[in-house]
Image (cartoon, grey):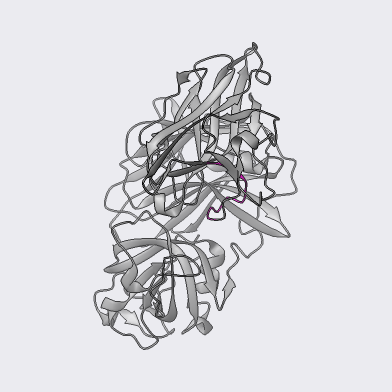
């Protein structure tokens, strides 16, 4: 998140790394270890802040574009090098702060924090080749400064949101009958950086909320928010909206956040959403998983960031709905209290539902995987180890739980992930069936490393007795599954 229209550049010198560097927080990469071919893999790096980009520059072409100190720096980015005295830009790394959390931005930028010069930091983000003229690093989500973690969004209520209002447990907004966002009761449109703002676009008798960006590629970031009224999230809440991308360019991003208050501070939590369009291919109906926020009160924010690249590009949203139509018919969370030792499926008596699971070959287990960011027990499927492939079929017998009649539009959803070294594993390495009928798994769906993603599959029946997860003949693959849920909509 940004608070300044300028672009910040901080310069960081890398500390020497030993041969055990792995890109983790405890063993961060040195500059020479970073791979710029795998830009989708997040890694940790460490270094020293040694200067910044001059305010009058928007590219780094030579040392003339860099201020080796704090006077006159342009406050939106970081650069890394091998030591405090490094002045060779070929040995430096540009670290983008513009897409980072506001707390990280406020704590790191040299313009506001001149005492940070020559301080050591560790940061987690993603490699980016040729960022404003040099190797880069962006989407910074975690930072340690002087051996202390920087707290996210460490200021109170930056949008002045009315947390004391009566929340609604449902919402329907199609943007019809208005000409400006400000006409919507209790909605808020706020631009933090730049002059672009959300507008109502009416075309062919249909209105949408639209954010548009155009102009030359100056590299100056834009950040603007559209925020719903205060909402109460229930266990069976469903949040959906239609999304369109027009003349999509890779320099723009639309992200969804849950915004709530805790200890007098506003907390912004990004909600992973896989289907936001990254190409101009018509409308997509998007369902946002709010399971983690059940029982909480907060706002849902649409955050647009980016910078122009000659085209007139836009994101458009419509038909925003928070409903409680679809009921949870089955849920197994496996619990959050860590299991000390892995427990075979056939020995697992159930956390939310007793005696539901059974494994044919008893390879799969329930465990608390320390290598995942999700702090929860999971169903862990090891599809092979070294030269030995494993196979198993895990069944969930739900005939005594799912009603025989009265529901339609059933769905099976779950969180799934893998370890960092198996990033990109296709989800369809596991076959999923309901009463023997295979459920369609998009072959493009892949798993992130150490971070769980939400998947939802349609069930072509009005009731089910058994769900199965099966796998075979795959080496060195592991898939963890959590929060298995079956939902249904009442027929009348």
Residue 157 in which image quadrant: bottom right
Residue 256 at x, y percent in the picture: 52, 45
Q: Is residue 109 visible?
A: no
Looking at the picture, how far across and down is residue 417, in whole percent? 49, 45
The reply to whether the magenta stretch includes residue 55 is no
Q: Quadrant of the C terminus?
A: top right
Instruction: Give the overall secondary structure of the magenta segment.
Output: loop
Q: Which residues are magenta?
A: 371-380
Farthest residue, direction bottom: 85
Toward the viewer: 414 or 99? 414
Residue 223 rendering spot, x and y as whole percentages:
46, 55
Q: At 56% from the left edge and 27% from the top edge, which residue is drawn?
A: 395
**Quarter occupied by residue 266:** bottom right
- In depth, the one of 167 and 328 nearer the eye is 328
Residue 9 falls in image quadrant: bottom left
Residue located 59% across and 29% down the image? 358
Q: From what the image shows, is residue 36 above or below residue 209?
A: below
Q: Is residue 179 left or right of residue 281?
A: right
């Amino acid at each position: 998140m940004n608070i300044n229209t300028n672009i910040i550049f901080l310069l960081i010198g890398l500390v020497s790394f030993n041969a055990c560097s792995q890109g983790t927080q405890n063993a961060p990469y040195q500059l020479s270890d970073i791979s710029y071919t795998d830009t989708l893999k997040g890694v940790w790096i460490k270094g020293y802040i040694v200067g910044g980009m001059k305010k009058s520059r928007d590219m780094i072409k030579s040392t003339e574009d860099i201020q080796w100190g704090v006077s006159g720096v342009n406050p939106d980015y970081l650069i890394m090098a091998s030591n405090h005295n490094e002045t060779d830009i070929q040995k430096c790394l540009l670290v983008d702060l513009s897409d980072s959390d506001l707390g990280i931005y406020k704590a790191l930028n040299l313009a506001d924090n001149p005492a940070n010069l020559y301080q050591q930091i560790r940061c987690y983000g993603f490699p980016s080749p040729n960022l404003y003229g040099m190797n880069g690093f962006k989407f910074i989500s975690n930072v340690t400064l002087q051996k202390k973690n920087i707290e996210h969004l460490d200021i109170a209520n930056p949008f002045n949101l009315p947390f004391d209002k009566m929340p609604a447990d449902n919402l329907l907004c199609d943007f019809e009958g208005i000409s400006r966002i400000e006409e919507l009761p209790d909605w808020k449109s706020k631009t933090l950086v730049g002059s672009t703002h959300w507008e109502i676009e009416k075309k062919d008798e249909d209105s949408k909320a639209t954010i548009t960006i155009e102009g030359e590629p100056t590299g100056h970031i834009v950040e603007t928010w559209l925020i719903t009224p205060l909402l109460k999230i229930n266990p069976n809440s469903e949040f959906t909206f239609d999304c369109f991308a027009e003349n999509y360019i890779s320099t723009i991003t639309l992200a969804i956040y849950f915004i709530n208050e805790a200890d007098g501070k506003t907390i912004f939590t990004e909600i992973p959403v896989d289907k936001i369009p990254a190409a101009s291919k018509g409308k997509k109906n998007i369902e946002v998983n709010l399971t983690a926020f059940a029982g909480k009160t907060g706002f849902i924010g649409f955050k647009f960031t980016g910078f122009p690249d000659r085209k007139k590009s836009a994101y458009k949203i419509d038909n925003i709905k928070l409903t409680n139509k679809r009921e949870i018919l089955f849920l197994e969370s496996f619990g959050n209290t860590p299991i000390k030792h892995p427990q075979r499926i056939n020995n697992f008596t159930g956390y939310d539902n007793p005696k539901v699971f059974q494994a044919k070959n008893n390879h799969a287990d329930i465990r608390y995987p320390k290598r995942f960011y999700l702090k929860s027990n999971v169903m862990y499927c090891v599809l092979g180890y070294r030269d030995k492939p494993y196979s198993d079929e895990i069944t969930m017998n739900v005939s005594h739980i799912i009603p025989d009649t009265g529901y339609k539009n059933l769905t099976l959803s779950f969180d799934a992930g893998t370890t960092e070294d198996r990033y990109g594993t296709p989800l369809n390495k596991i076959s999923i069936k309901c009463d023997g009928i295979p459920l369609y798994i998009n072959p493009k769906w892949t798993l992130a490393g150490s971070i769980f993603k939400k998947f939802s599959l349609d069930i072509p029946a009005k009731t089910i007795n058994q769900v199965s997860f099966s796998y075979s003949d795959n080496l060195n693959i592991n898939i963890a599954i959590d929060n298995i849920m079956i939902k249904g909509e009442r027929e009348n």
